[in-house]
């Protein structure tokens, strides 16, 4: 999929307070804002967006996002809804000379003309550069920095800072333990010492309900989930699934909570199906 460059010149246009936007992305994982892509076009939801700072501070690469679904999708419009998921503080942007050295074929100097397209081969270099010089990754290596992986390779998950906060995570684990609250999986039981105290935590409050006055209660707002159940909590829904919903889904699929099926058991099941003529 072709990515789009959006230019932002705070000296000419500044209807958002950038420090507040940075705080919102840190807190909620996303900041959705209406943007003019420069000309009337239909940009599909999910298209990657690279935000380039212009004016006396730029040019420089300062953010990544994606086009969010909007009412009337499919109709050309002068505005698109952009969900920004990773931004750099003003002054920490990737400068023009670095951009040109790493990606010389991208027209960065013309990025003030919002709507410029980036070829997939060029975007691979941008992603690599963003991974090296963009926002620092969080403490959980299973959540890479947004923009460092191809947009079509993984599903878009709304992971907020409460799921990455080490203090909140410790409080959640102290109360709930390190077994997955949905399937019962234990990294320590399966992997031994290297799995001790390893588990992801899931924030049960939808991002859309996080207001400025929100105060996290790690005991009621966070639950421990293994990576698989955490992914399924977010997969294909705007409001994450609860641990109860995940348990019902697992039960409907025939899963017995807290059990592990061995390779030998799977092979025995396959052999039985073959004998019964159910599998060839």
Image (tube, rainbow, N blue to C red):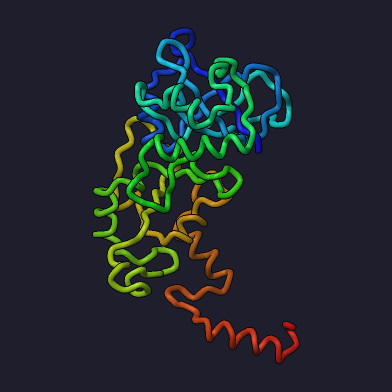
Q: Residue at x 58, y 22 (%)?
A: 107
Judge left or right: residue 150 versus residue 175: right
Q: Residue at x 41, y 62 (%)?
A: 226
- Quarter of the image with the C terminus is bottom right
Q: How many numbered discs? A: 0
Judge left or right: residue 64 versus residue 114: left
Q: Which is more toward the observer, 70 or 138? A: 138
Relative height, residue 10 to residue 1 (above, below): above
Q: Which is more toward the observer, 263 or 241? A: 263
Q: Which is more toward the observer, 184 or 37? A: 37
User: Residue 228, percent across and down?
Assistant: 48, 61
Judge left or right: residue 165 versus residue 34: left
Residue farthest to the bottom, as pictured: 275
The picture quadrant where one finds residue 47 is top right
User: Residue 14, percent across and down?
Assistant: 45, 13
Q: Is residue 19 visible?
A: no
The picture quadrant where one finds residue 87 is top left
Q: Is residue 99 visible?
A: yes
Relative height, residue 78 to residue 168 (above, below): above
Relative height, residue 39 to residue 261 (above, below): above
Q: Residue at x 53, y 70 (%)?
A: 251
Q: Residue at x 25, y 54 (%)?
A: 170
User: Residue 138, percent across and down?
Assistant: 35, 45
Q: Which is more toward the observer, 224 or 266? A: 266
- Quarter of the image with the N terminus is top right
The picture quadrant where one finds residue 243 is bottom left
Judge left or right: residue 268 versus residue 183: right
User: Residue 197, percent across and down?
Assistant: 28, 63
């Amino acid at each position: 999929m072709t990515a789009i460059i959006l230019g932002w010149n705070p000296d000419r246009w500044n209807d958002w307070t950038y420090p507040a936007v940075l705080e919102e992305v840190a807190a909620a994982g996303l900041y959705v804002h209406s943007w003019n892509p420069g000309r009337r076009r239909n940009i599909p939801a999910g298209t990657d967006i690279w935000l380039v700072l212009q004016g006396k501070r730029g040019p420089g690469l300062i953010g990544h996002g994606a086009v969010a679904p909007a009412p009337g999708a499919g109709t050309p419009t002068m505005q698109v809804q952009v969900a920004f998921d990773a931004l750099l503080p003003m002054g920490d942007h990737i400068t023009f000379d670095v951009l040109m050295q790493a990606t010389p074929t991208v027209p960065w100097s013309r990025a003030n003309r919002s709507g410029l397209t980036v070829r997939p081969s060029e975007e691979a270099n941008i992603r690599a550069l963003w991974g090296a010089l963009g926002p620092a990754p969080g403490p959980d290596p299973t959540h890479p920095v947004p923009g460092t992986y191809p947009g079509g390779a993984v599903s878009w998950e709304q992971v907020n800072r409460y799921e990455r906060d080490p203090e909140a995570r410790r409080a959640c684990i102290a109360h709930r333990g390190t077994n997955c609250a949905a399937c019962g999986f234990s990294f320590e039981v399966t992997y031994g010492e290297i799995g001790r105290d390893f588990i992801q935590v899931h924030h049960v409050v939808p991002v859309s309900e996080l207001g400025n006055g929100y105060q996290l209660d790690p005991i009621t707002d966070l639950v421990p989930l293994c990576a698989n159940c955490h992914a399924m909590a977010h997969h294909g829904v705007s409001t994450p699934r609860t641990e109860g919903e995940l348990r019902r889904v697992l039960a409907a699929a025939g899963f017995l909570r807290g059990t592990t099926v061995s390779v030998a058991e799977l092979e025995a099941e396959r052999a039985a199906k073959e004998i019964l003529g159910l599998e060839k």
